[in-house]
Image (cartoon, grey):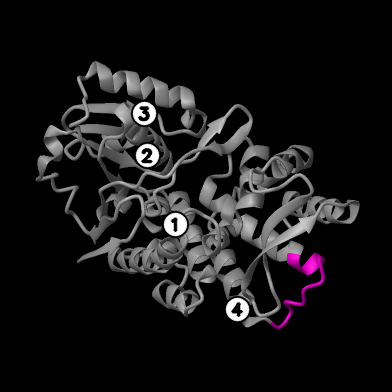
Amino acid sequence: MLETFNIQSESGGYEVSIGSHMLVDGLKSEAHKCLKLIDDNVDRLWPLVCQGTGLKVLAVEQNKTLEQVAHLIEALRGLGANRSSYLYAFGGGIVQDLATFVASSYMRGIPWTYCPTTLLGMVDSCIGGKSSLNVGIYKNIAGNFYPPKKILIDIAFCQTLTMQEKIDGLCEAIKICFASPSFALEDCINIFDGDIEALSEKQLFDIVRLSLASKKMFIEEDEFDQGIRLLLNFGHTFGHAIEAATHFSVTHGVAVGVGMLAEIELSILRGIDLGKCARVEKLKSYLYSLLKNLPNLKNQLRTLSVGDALASFRSDKKHSTDKYYLILVNSQGRLERQGLVINPELELQIEIVFSNIKKGLLF
């Protein structure tokens, strides 16, 4: 299994290759001689892949910061990196965020290759060129656009993922497919019926390929998040608040899965009749089939502080001073970006949704 395609980008086009065992059998390229930024856990699980000169990072949300970027830049300089150096990054979304920012800013920019090792990274964040960093209490408030020269996706890395990590990726994949104006939602459901234990390498390959093909349209049409690409924020405004209000015990992809259900709920509270919308029912059924595999999720959500969730929600960088900007569902089951005037009625509706999340009423 091997497929290669190109992404057109104003920041510089780049190549994406999806395959199996092209990296885990040994990176037979100049990468052994290059600098590497490696998730600690990946280095432990795949030592042959990551051999060579490398910077290790503990890939946790608390390290996705400007302070960590500064530390990595200092470490690169200590290793003798210069403008001709090349960086390979191995890890999930946190490593990608750090690598994007480090590579773009080190000596005003060095080239790099990204090798995602999580399903979430493979199906979603690997293309698009964005970095997002946390500053203080504000999640993803800093960042830039600096795509890698190449993206190498090795499905074999999924062998060491936990069920929760697979669900993280599958939630993001179905989000992209639901946002797509094509039949990607139906195609994704046809590839995988929800039995995670039986999820095969071929199914993973097909899901990654479908998800990235769907996202490719969004980022090539709207590289810098000014229009249609904003629809891919579906589930994220509530999702980020869920992460923060549970102290990140709920992982990103799962939080986005619950966040999609939350934004469907808010659409209904605002008067949208989705009772007979087959498209929305397909999405909800698919998310239920994923989330039911996480028996501790409802307990984690019970720890959610509604006050903290509301505070995080209100501080989201997508909002303006007088409007909350959300991706909601219309009566045809399609996504729309809406600027909702902030008023007591809207605040109460949002609080009701968070309360229902805490009570476990959304799934």
Q: Answer with mark 4 or mark 1, whichever residue precedes in sequence.
A: 1
Q: Is residue 27 left or right of residue 111?
A: left
The residues tagged by marks 2 and 1 sit, at their Cα atoms, a distance apart of 15 Å
Q: Residue at x 51, y 59 (%)?
A: 171
User: The C terminus appears in which quarter of the rendering?
Assistant: bottom right
The residues tagged by marks 4 and 2 sit, at their Cα atoms, a distance apart of 35 Å
Whether the residues at callouts 2 and 1 have beta carbons within 8 Å, the answer is no
The mark closer to the camera, 2 or 3, is: 2
Whether the residues at callouts 1 and 3 have beta carbons within 8 Å, the answer is no
Under circle 2, the secondary element is: helix
Q: Answer with mark 1 or mark 3, whichever residue precedes in sequence.
A: 3
Mark 2 belongs to which amino acid? Answer: Thr
Mark 3 belongs to which amino acid? Answer: Val
Task: Give the magenta-colored segment's residue range.
Answer: 267-276
Q: Residue at x 32, y 28 (%)?
A: 106
The mark closer to the camera, 1 or 3, is: 1
Please give the label number shown on residue 57: 3
Quadrant assignment, res 274: bottom right
Under circle 3, the secondary element is: strand
The residues tagged by marks 4 and 1 sit, at their Cα atoms, a distance apart of 27 Å
Q: Answer with mark 3 or mark 4, whichever residue precedes in sequence.
A: 3
The mark closer to the camera, 4 or 2, is: 2
Q: Residues within 10 Å of mark 3 (few under 14, many from 20)?
A: many
Please give the label number shown on residue 223: 1
Figure check: 38 above or below 168: above
Q: Which residue is mark 2?
A: 100
Please give the label number shown on residue 279: 4
